[in-house]
Structure formats: C-alpha cells, structure tokens
Image: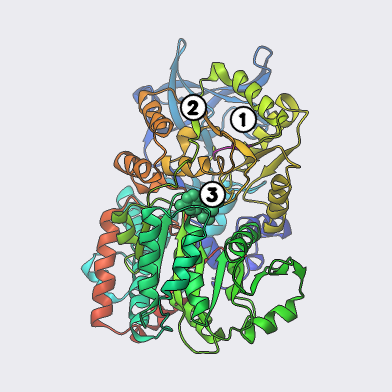
Amino acid sequence: MYLLEMPVENLTSVGKTTAKLLHKIGIDRVSDLIDYFPFRYDDFSQVVKVKDLLPNQIVTIKGKIILISNRRSFKKRMTITEALLEDETGSIKVIWFNQPFLIKNLKAGDEIFIAGRVTFDNLGLQFVSPSYEKNSSQAGLNTGKIVPIYSLTGRLTQKQLRFLIDIALKSVRQIAEWLPKEIIKNNKLISIAQALQEIHFPTSFVKLEKARYRLKFNEFFLIQLQSQRLKDYLAKVKAPQIKFREAEIKKFVAVLPFSLTADQKKSAWQILLDLEKEKPMNRLLEGDVGSGKTVVAALAILNVILNGYQTVLMAPTEILAKQHFNSLRDFFSNFNFNIALFTSSEQLQNDQLAMSNKKQILEQIKNGSINLIIGTHALIQDNVKYKNLGLVIIDEQHRFGVEQRKKIKEKNNNKKTPHFLSMTATPIPRSLALILYGDLDLSIIKEMPRGRKKIITRLVAEKDRLKAYNFIRQEINQGKQVFVICPLIDPSDKLGVKSVKEEFKKLDQNIFPEFEIGLLHGKLKAAEKEKIMSEFKANKIKILVSTSVIEVGIDIPNATIMMIEGSERFGLAQLHQFRGRVGRGEHQSYCFLFTDDSSTKTTQRLNALVKSADGFALAEYDLKFRGPGEVYGTRQSGLPDLKIASLNDLELINLTKKEAVNFFENYSLADFPLLEAKLDKNKLIDHLE
Ligand code: ADP
Ligand code: MG
C-alpha cells in the first residue's frame, strides 16, 4: 500500500517515461490517480452470444479468432484488418481500419472480448473498429465489467492507467470521511472511499449511480458551504463607508462622450448605495460584452478615490488588465489620480507611460499615493501592501472566498475589509444566479448602448464554404482580421488541441497561405498565449485559430469576422460570447456559423442566434432545451469548475444548499476540522497564473 501523498514515481511500475505522461495530465501523486475520474464507461459486463446480436446494439461478445489478416484498400488508401470471430452459437466479422499492427497481437486461436456497436451491411452483421481485449489473467480490470475510459495523453494507454489507478485505490481507506455523519445519513450517501472505488471500477450501474451522486453532492455541498461561510464572515467584518459624492459624480457623467443607459444608471446606483454601508459590498455586475460595464466600475472607483481610499482591479490576463488600464486612464483624464498597471511583465503609471520599476510602485501603493492599481488576478498573491484599500473589482471571476478576503484584509493597512465587485459577461439568468451565487447581490445590464451596428450572423451551408472564404479574403485584404473558433471534438482530447491544430494546418497551408495565421489553445503557457494575443492585437496575425480559450473581454476593434466551426457543439450563450469579440470597432462585423448537423433542432437553435442579439434571451432559450450544463462553456465562464456534477443537476444544487444552510445554523465549522480543511483546499480562485 502506498501513502496518498507519495509521488507516482514511487509506484514500482512507473518509470520515467510514464511519470512524465502522468504529470502531463496533472497526476503527480498517488491521490491524483484516485481523483482522475473516467469520462465514460464501456459496459463489458453483459457478454452476449453471437446468435443474439441485433443491429445497432452496443455489446460485448467473447469468442475465438478463426482467422485474421490485413488487406490494402487502394480506393480508401488504408489498411483494413479483417477477422472472423466465433463462439458456440455462431460467427461474426470484425474489421479495423489502419491498425496493421493488430495482427501481431491478435492471432487465430486467441480468445478475445470485442466490445462496440453492431452494424449491419449487405453481408450481414459486423463490428467496425470495436475495442478488444485478450482473455488473459489481467482481464479483470479491462473486461467482464463496466470498464472506465479515461482521457489519455501520448502513449499512455487505458490499460496502463487502469492498472495504476487500481493500485492507488488500495490506499483509498486512508481518505477520511469528511462529510458530517448526519448529512451522510439523511441523504443516504455512500462513503467517500466506496464512492471513489466505484467511480473507477463500478460493480454495477446502480452502484456507479450512487458513486456519482455522492461525488456530485461533495462538489455542490462545498460550493454552498463556501457561500454560507462567506455570508457568515461578511456579517462580522467592517468595510469603510464610502460617502456618495454627488457633485463630482454628476460632473463626471456630464462630460462622458455618451449618455448612460438606464441599466447602467441603475447598476451604478445600486453599487453606490452598497458602498455607503459598513457591511462590505458583495455584488456581481452582469452585462453582455460591450454593454458598458467599465464605466459603471469607473463611477464606483471615482467615488472610492474621492473618499480617500484605494481601489484594486484585477483581470484574468495581462492583455485585459492593460485594456482596463487604458480605458480607465481615459475616463479619469480630468482628475489628478495616480493610476498604476502592475503585472509581472509590465509596470506603468498614469499617462506618461513612464516605466516605473516594481519597487517604486509597491512603495507608492503602500504609502497611498497610488489611487488605482490594475493588474492580473495574481495581485492578491503578490507581496503588495495597501494603505487604505476600499474596493476590490474582479473581472470575469465571480467568486472570491473567505480566504482571499482575509488575505486582502491582511495586506490592507487600515485593517478594513474592502467592498467587492465582480464583473462578468456571462449571461446568467437571475434564477440560476440565485441558486449558484446566493451570497452575491446582482446588478444586470440588459440594454446595449444605442447606435451599435448589429453583427450580421449567418448560418453558412457547406456548399457556400468557399464563398465565405472568399469574403474573408476580401476583408483581410482591406486590413481586417478574423477569429476562427473550433470545438473540442474528441472528448479524450480535453483541451481540444487536436481539432484546432488540424484547422490551423488546413487554413495555413491550403486556404490562406498568403496570410499570417496564429494558433491558440489551452495547452499553451500563459506567456505564449499573451504573446500570440498581442501579435493579433498588433495586426501582425490576420487570422487567429483558437479553441474556446480566448478571453471574453478582449478588444480587437479591427477584427470583423468571427467564424465558428462545429457551432452545434457550443451553447448559444457561449456562441453569443464568441460573437461579442467582433463588432467592437466602427466597421460592420460578421459572424459565420458552420455545422455538419443539419437536423431541424440544430438549425432552429442556431437560427435563434442569427435572429437575436440578446445574450440573456439566448441563454434562457438554451436553458429551456438543454439545461445550464450545456449552455455555458466551463472554462472562463466564471461558473464553478465542476469535475463531475453539472449545472443541470438543479435539484441537487437546491438540496445541498438546504443542507449547507442547515449545517451553518446548527453546527460550528470548527468542530469539523476535516471539512474545514477541505473548504480551505477547495480554492475558489483557481486560475491564478
Ligand atoms: P464591457 O461591458 O464589455 O466591459 P465596455 O465597458 O468595454 O463593455 O464598453 C464597450 C464600449 O462601449 C466602450 O468603448 C465604452 O466606452 C462604450 N460605452 C459604454 N457605455 C456606453 C453608452 N451608454 N453609450 C455609448 N457607448 C458606451
Ligand atoms: Mg470589459
């Protein structure tokens, strides 16, 4: 048995190469193996006889190979491996494509399991490219059961991973039960150890369901408890009271180059009222891309600075931080404010853009002469000390837990807890937000500023693809730029690297060899991503091919075309957010949707996007038909990063909320050290880079 904290290198069967592959998928310790859940299962448990096979069934059969051989198909330019498999009731043909090496492993006379879909062609039933497994001594993990399928990388195989996870699970009893007994009993949950065992190697589908339920419960319960804990905390601490400076605010609004929309006014008003209280504000400002959240934030900042307090504004990336720096510097150009941009690669101050060094800026933040500090989320980790911080604003990050607030408070010389405002472009309807973020007050900007050019959205038929490419070419020749978004196609390819690379190759080599094309995906390091984005921003790159990782708020006024491949795979709210990345300048912009799915349902959904420019309406349309788990992408949507639960589990969300409220009313967290530790570990800001 191994200790949970041991590095995977300690496992006798893990050499250097395997260890490297494991690290690549985030597995460093024995416990990480246990936490690496399958993304689906193959049911090898029901072994069917050949005579009972029906077309389209997904089944496992066990039989003996009668013959197996390779042949070349010149028409299809591939090797086809054909085998005949027999059990005591009959025989069936099995074929695989482009796996010539199979005949080295599988020989006539071998007993094997075959699992997959039974298909039907003019010669009868057959299996096409099924999973297979020899009936060997090791078969226990891989056949005759419900078998887990994991995301893999490189040469790592399912069999290898199952073998290692099985070893790791021998240590599962070391994981102490951290949920309070009462809660386990009342909800008829299975133990954590049992759940982890069953999620990997289910002994039945009923047990698997119980395991999933327990693990989902874990996730939601922790989120809800976090929420209650924050409420509790905020009730006890004090924030600086920020007086409403009416005259200056009015003057600021009067000289803006536009008039505020009603929703902007209302949101600003709600925020300014919160700031006057001694209870720290805890508010989420929601508004579609381009709805003008920044100016609302600016009003809050103005008020805070005029009251003699500092504000810090954090964004998910350096580029977005810089963008905020530029807009706020412009908004406050009539004021004598000291504004700093503080990121790991760049430190700027005010309009002279003089390079100040890090040490100087830190000193000025500490002595209070800098009023507004803008940077990335890393700002709360950095060694920054504030003189009198009054307001923290976070862009595209809804949650800011007790730990983060305590940390900020410690950095703050006035020992007060600052007010907190988070901003997001994800259109989360109020009903859903209340369940998920019950601890946050909501301000919603629904109405877009007037005079925006509508983005022309088209569902492009495959036969018109070339026309679309030609149109794109014309636009680029006129100096414009293009985004191309690719979906994640293979679920084992978690970061969507495969599909985006193929698309890049196609565009780069075949379609647009004359243009500079960039590639962006989740596997790139933060610095590499920033570099590509800034080249795109500088118009060096004309076409940016990307997975859904590109930032929500990025402002490329010159980009006029958003082209989305496999658009049926995205939720409408997410598609709408992609679309929001164009149309930010004065030019007419376009969004082209491609899909291989010509079903009426898909066409209808995508047409909703063609017709509507209202992010909330689109989100609600999709919520009705698909449930929240499908509507929003998971990354960067600011929604909780769920491992196994889904936002579709509304009932469970409600239930865990009740349990969390109940727990806080009747118990003290301090009496449950394991649970408390779990909460502290379950960091709510997880994309710190
Ligand atoms: P987002 O909500 O996506 O952060 P921004 O705050 O970046 O949106 O605003 C987008 C653009 O719209 C900015 O150039 C901003 O100056 C402008 N803007 C904001 N409010 C209004 C308004 N009421 N009327 C016209 N333009 C506005
Ligand atoms: Mg913004």
State the residue in front, 583 or 514: 583
x then y, percent, for residue 297: 48, 64
Q: Nearer the viewer, residue 538 or 350?
A: 350
Residue reaching furthest to the left: 186
Determine crowd level at label 1: few under 14, some 14-19, many 20+ residues with C-alpha closer than 10 A. some
Residue annotated with mark 1: 107
Q: Is residue 92 visible?
A: yes
User: What number is the disc on residue 458?
Assistant: 2
Under mark 3, the amino acid is: Gln
Question: Circle 3 sits on which residue?
Answer: 138
**Image coordinates for residue 50, horizontal then vertical, percent:** 40, 25
* Quadrant of the image containing the N terminus: bottom right
- Residue 175: say if magenta: no
Q: Mark 3 against mark 2, which lies toward the viewer? A: 2
Specify start and end residues of the magenta stretch as a single range.
482-487
Residue 400 x %, y %: 46, 70
- Residues under numbered marks 3 and 2 in contact, where contact means CB atoms less than 8 Å apart: no
Q: Secondary structure at mark 1?
A: loop
Residue 272 to residue 198: above or below? below
